[in-house]
Amino acid sequence: MAKRAANGLEEFALHPIEASQLQARRERVYLILAGLFIGSMTMLNLLGVTRFLDLSFEMFGRTVPIPLAVGVLPYPLTFLCTDFISEIYGRKRANHLVWVGFLVNVWLGLILWLGGALPGFDQPVADAAGRLPLFFELRTLTLGAMVASMVAYLAAQLCDVHIFHFWKRLTKGKHLWLRNNGSTFVSQFVDSVAVISITHFLAGGIPVTEGEPIWPQLWVFILTAYVFKFVAAAVDTVPFYLGTRWLSRYLEIDPNSELES
């Protein structure tokens, strides 16, 4: 982008639709946060339950099982992004982003479905080992899990935005740690229960042992995912505090201004 000198400072030349340097800065930061959010959500749905990590460990002579889906790894970042946007840009923009993320992942699902429906050089036929060609293996795992993920996603993210602003109004903009952690802890529990149970009953994508009671096994996956998200949310409290303070100054936005409108 071309640059120009203004008051002795190097500044980016404005695009005709940008009203001011400050407005352009605000929109670029929003774009970065939105891109991180949507990119993480798309990555989550592509990776999903394609692999489970075994993070089990020994304690007091017993094995503590910790099976963690690879798709969960980028998930905490989505809540940090929506919390930043909720705090700095307000509830409406946060809700808009949640719905845009949903539509992007619907588009992803459509392409996966269409890619398998159109004729190709390979066919969805299992080999001697019972494995489908790579695309169809990924498609089978992703499409079923994606339905579960999207239902859980909408429930959890809208819950996160709603609770965040409930606590913000209740505390009159104080106690940032409370709305950051409170909203995330509740919404991530909603997400964990929904995505694991729907993935199992709709897509059969959870590696459970046949012949054993199903819910005790599912609760292991639910609680493992939730504990991971819980710890990640607790860890991101400091970055959220520092990031909110810096962004408020950098973007010249009062996070509590919407409470006065």
Image (cartoon, helix red, strand yellow):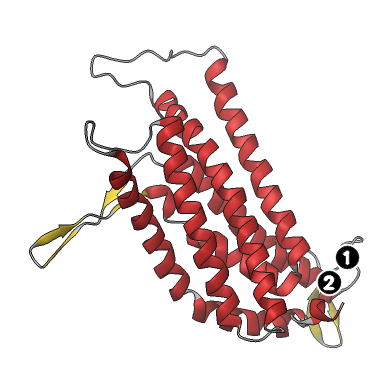
Given residues 135 and 78, the one toward you in this image is 78
> Which numbered tag is attached to residue 18?
1
Which image quadrant for residue 83? Answer: bottom right
The amino acid beneath tag 1 is Glu
Disc 2 crowd, CA 10 A, few/some/many (<14, 14-19, 20+):
few
What residue lies at 84% left-to-right and 69% top-to-bottom?
13
Count of picture labels: 2
Which image quadrant for residue 175? Answer: bottom right
Q: Name above or below for residue 41 compared with residue 107.
A: below
- Reading the image, the residue beneath label 2 is 23
CA separation in Å, label 1 and label 2: 7 Å
Q: Name above or below for residue 250 compared with residue 181.
A: below
Can residue 169 be seen here? Answer: yes
What residue lies at 49% left-to-right and 74% top-to-bottom?
236
Given residues 162 and 67, the one toward you in this image is 162
Can residue 68 be seen here? Answer: no
